[in-house]
Image (cartoon, rainbow, N blue to C red):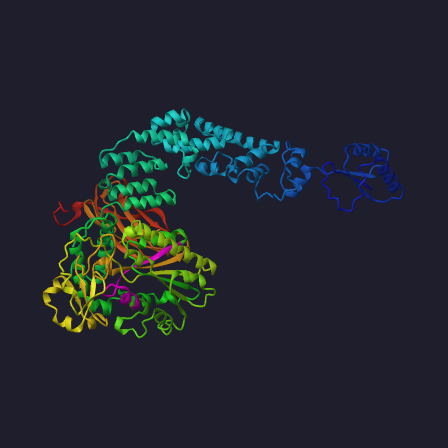
Amino acid sequence: MIHIINDPDHLVPSNVDFIHYSDDYVKTYQVIESSIQNQNNIALVIRNLTIFHWITNMSRRYPQGTFAFETIDARGALSQRWGIDIPETVTNEEIMQVGLLSSDLHPQPGFSFEDTLLAHYYAPILMSKTFPLKQLPSLLEAVEPQKWKDNLGFPLLARTLRARMEEWKNKARSSEQRQLVEMFAADPASLKLQLMRFRVLCSYPTIGAAVLKDSIDIFRVLKLPLEDLKVEDSRIPETVQQVTYFLNNQQPTSPEDLADLLDRSSGLLQVEFETIEKHLSPHPDWLTPELMEKIEQKFGGHSRWLTTRINALREMIRPAKPNYPDPQWDVETMLTWARDSYLLYQAWCDRQELFDPDLYQIGDRFSEWLTNKWDDLHANSKCMVFNILPNKSSELRRAGVVNLILVIDNLAWSFSEILRDLLQDQGFFLSEAEPYLAMLPTETEISKKCLLAGSVGYSQLDDKTYSGIIEKGWVPYFNDQAFRYVSDIGSLSKIETIDASTYVVNYLAIDKALHKSADEIGMPHREHIRHLLEKLVENTIKFIDKHDLRESIRIHVVSDHGSTRISDEQKNDLDMKFFKAEGFEARSHRYLKVSNERFELLADNLKHDCFFLPANKFGNTEHYLCARRANRFLATDRRSYVHGGLLPEEVVVPYMLFEPIGAPVQDLTVLLKKTEFRYRAETVDLEIGNPNHSIVEKILVSIMNGNVESEPVQISSLNSNRNISVQLKARFKSTNNPEEQTNLRLRIRFVTRGEEHTFEVNKSITMKRLVDEKNTDIFDF
C-alpha cells in the first residue's frame, strides 16, 4: 500500500523514518511506480500541495486500496494533543500563527478551547462566563497592557477576547453593567484610572461630577466593591491637584472642624494626611485619643513611611497625668502603672522638653514603695533584672535555637519602641515585652553585672569581668551549653563559626550618648538614638544573614537601668557643698558612695531628700545615698540624662524577645464570661487572648450592636499566648431586631508585626426584661 500523508504545515517531525520526496514530483512518481511493481508498502510525506493533488490524480489509475491518503493539519494535531474539540472557526493558519503546537501549553481538566487561550494568554479570571463584578479589582490588576496588546496582534487571540467581552455584555444585568464591560473592553487601563479617581472623589461629590462626568453615575449605581483597588497618587495627578485646591480652601478653627474635615476625606491620598498633619502642628491640644483613632482608621492601610508619621502624631497626644501609686500595691500592679501610666506621661514630657514638678513627686511615691518593699521584691517577685536570664531558661535551652542577647546599656522603656520598629522592618517581631526592676543604685557596674550573672547582689559576684560572668558562670545552669561574651556590636562580624547556643553582646553607645549634652551631639537625643539603634540592627542582621540564622535565631533585648533629665531650674533640696566633705564620693549626679563612718553618722532628716542604701540590705560592697525626686549631688544640664536614682524612668527597664515571622496572624480569642443581660446599664466581662507568637498592641474592643451604648476599651499590649480580662460599661436598650436580642456583636482591632488587623465576632446572649427582677430599683447606674 502506498500511504500518502499530506503535511502542509510540516507537522511530521523530520527525524521519523518516512521518505520525503515532496519537492520533486518526478522522483516521487518513480518511487511510487517502483513500489507498486514490487508490491512494497511505503509512506510518503508530501509537504507541497500541488504535488499532493498530482498524486491524488495519479491514484485514480490504480485499483482501489492501492493508495491511502491522510491529511495531518494543525487543527487535527492540536485536538489530538489537547484532547478537546477545536471550534470550526479556528483555521490551521491561526493555530500555526499563535504557535499552539510548539508551546508547552496544556488545558486543565474541564477547560474549553477558548478558556484555555484566555487563561494562558490573558488572565485566568477571564474564564468567567459573566463579568466578575465582585472581583473587579482583581480583574483590573490582572491586566498586563503590553502583553495584552501583543496578543491582540494574533487574529485568533483577538477574536477569542472579543467574543468573551461580547458574552459579558450580553449577560449584563443592567445597562450600567453593560457600559462598564464596554469601558473595560475598550481600555482596561483607562478604566482602572477612572476607578482610582472614583474611590477618591466619592468623598468630594462636587469635584467628582466635574472630573468623572457621566461615569460617576454608572459607578455609583453599580456600588462597586473597590476596597482592594490600590490608589496610586502619581497616576491621577489631576485628581490630586483638585483635592489639594479643595483642602487648601478649608481652614478649621477647632478640633470639631478638623474632625469634620477628616470625616470628609477619602483617606487614600498623601495630601489628605499632610493637610491634617499641617493643621495639628500648631494645635497639638486638638489631638485626642479619639481623633487619633479616627486618623488611624482613615489612613492606617498606607505604606510604612506614613505609619511612621502616624506614630509621630500619636506621640503628640498628651497622656493623662498619672495618679499617685498606692503604697500597698503588689509588684504586678505597680509595674503596670509604671508602664501604662507614669512612663507614658514621662516620655511625652521628655519629648516635649517639659519638666513637670509634680511628676517628681509622683515618681517619689514609687521610689518609697520600692525601698519599703525591697526585701520582698528581692526575694520573691522574680521581677528583678537578675531574674531575667533564669526566667528565660526554657527559651535559652531550646534545641536548634541560637540566642542573641543584646545588652543595651541605659535603654529606657520609651526608646525600646524605636528598636521594636527597626527589628520589625527586618522581619523580626516582638513576641514578648515585660518590665523589670533594676538593681540599686541604678548604675551600670552594679545592675548590669547582676543582670548578666543572675546574682542577687553585687557583693555576691566572684568574678566581676563580663567575659568571666558569661562564659563561666552560666555553664552549669544551662547544661554546659556554651555562652559567648561579645564586648561590642562590631565584634559580631569577627565570629566565623557558630559554636555556642547563646551570644551576649554588650552595647554602650546609648549610655554614652545620653550622658552627652544634645548641644554636643548636635541633634535631639531621640533622633541620635534612632541612628545608633539603626546601626545596631544593621550589624545584627549582617551577623544573622552571614550565618544563615533567619529561621533559628531568637533576639533578646535587656537593659541594666534607665535615666532621667533634670533641669537646673528644678528645686534641689540638697546642699551640694555638704557632700564635698570627706567620707562622701560623688559617683554621679544622682548617687554617691558613703564611707562606713559617715554612713553611721547621717542624720535621719536627710532621708526626706535622700534614700539610704545600706550595703548589706542592698547586696552592695559600699553604702550609697540616692537623691530623691529632682534632687542631685552635682549640677545638672537639662540637655543631658542622668541616672542612679530611684524614679521609675531610672529603675524600670524592658525585656523584649523578638522571633522571626512564623505562622500567619490569628484573630484574638474572645470569651464572653456572662451571657445573660437585661435592658439596663450592664458590665460586659470579656477575656481577650493572644494565640499568636508575636505581641499584639493597641487593642481596641468595641460593641457594635445598634441598641447598645458603650465606649470602646483600649489595651496597650498583650504578650504572646497570654490573656487578659476586659470590662466594658454598656447600656442595653430595648430593640425589635431579633439579631440584637440574641447576639452581641464585638469588633476587635489590634496591631501586630507592624500591621493593623480587624475582625468581628458574634456571641450568643440572652436578653431579659427589667421587670423580671425581684428588686424594685430600676434606676440603677
Q: Quadrant of residue 542?
A: bottom left
Residue found at x 34% / y 26%: 206
Q: 292 above or below 555? A: above
Q: Quadrant of residue 336?
A: bottom left
Q: Quadrant of residue 606?
A: bottom left
Magenta segment range?
428-449
Q: 269 above or below 691? A: above
Q: Nearer the viewer, residue 185 or 534?
A: 534
Q: Nearer the viewer, residue 630 or 40?
A: 630
Residue 552 falls left or right of residue 612: right
Q: Nearer the viewer, residue 89 or 424?
A: 424
Residue 659 falls left or right of residue 456: right
Q: Is residue 79 visible?
A: yes
Q: Nearer the viewer, residue 641 or 171?
A: 641
Work out which quarter of the rendered image holds the N terminus and state it.
top right
Q: Is residue 446 magenta?
A: yes
Q: Position of residue 469 (x, y in %)?
A: 34, 71
